[in-house]
Image (cartoon, rainbow, N blue to C red):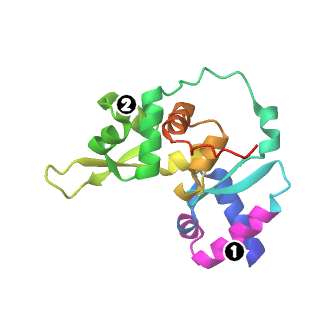
Amino acid sequence: MSDEIERALEATLFAAEEPLTAEALAGHLGGASPSEVREGLDGLQQHYRDRGIHLVERGGRWHFQTAPDLAHVLRREREAVRRLSRAATEVLAIVAYHEPVSRAEIEAIRGVQTSPGTLDVLMEAGWVRVAGRREVPGRPVIYATTPEFLEHFGLKSRRDLPGIDELKAAGLLDPVDDAFDALTMSPEPAQESDG
């Protein structure tokens, strides 16, 4: 039965237009239980481990993708990808690390006002969504990331976001902050030696 489920999962994932959860796959297969589907997905993932495509899970959803070491084979000239502005990148990072977060909270963290267009760009890209309203006076809208955000950045979950040490090691944190901290720390007085 396991081979039959693996074959059905393989066909379903190959034909799917978007990544699917284990529950959605169980629904497609009719009589398969979620545990059988997960077992089948694990088997397929092992089968494709050394192949030209891999079965991967991103944000709880499964899909096939090109093996990372073969991506260069498929590269073609593409239209220039529109880069995010620095403001949009900052807002995306704040939403990812602090979600759910309101616009006022984003502005408090950034220290500057955020243009409504910045959040619109992130929502159009499919990386940020409205997650409801905070239960406080004024009921501000709160924002969170989407499964597409996880998929685009190759993350299984938000727990896979890099920590401060990883960001520093990658040179992605502003060295001005470190330099300022070093200047403002009082050095210990030098001890004189008998000499």
> Tag 2's secondary structure?
helix
Quadrant location, the C terminus? top right
Q: Residue at x 49, y 28 (%)?
A: 84
Give the residues drawn in magenta, as a range.
24-46
Q: Is residue 97 visible?
A: yes
Q: Is residue 175 above or below residue 144?
A: above
CA neighbours of label 1 inside 10 A, class few (<14), some (14 to 19), many (20+): some
In the image, residue 43 lies in the stretch drawn in magenta:
yes
Image-based side of 135 in relation to 22, left or right: left
Q: Residue at x 53, y 25 (%)?
A: 83
**Residue 167 x/y as whole percent:** 60, 43
**Residue 52 x/y as whole percent:** 82, 47
Quadrant location, the N terminus? bottom right
- Residue 141: mark in rendering: none
Residue under label 1 = 39
Residue under label 2 = 118
Real-space CA distance between mark 1 and mark 2, rounded to the nearest whole angstrom? 42 Å
Q: Is residue 17 visible?
A: no
Which is the main secondary structure of the residues drawn in magenta? Answer: helix
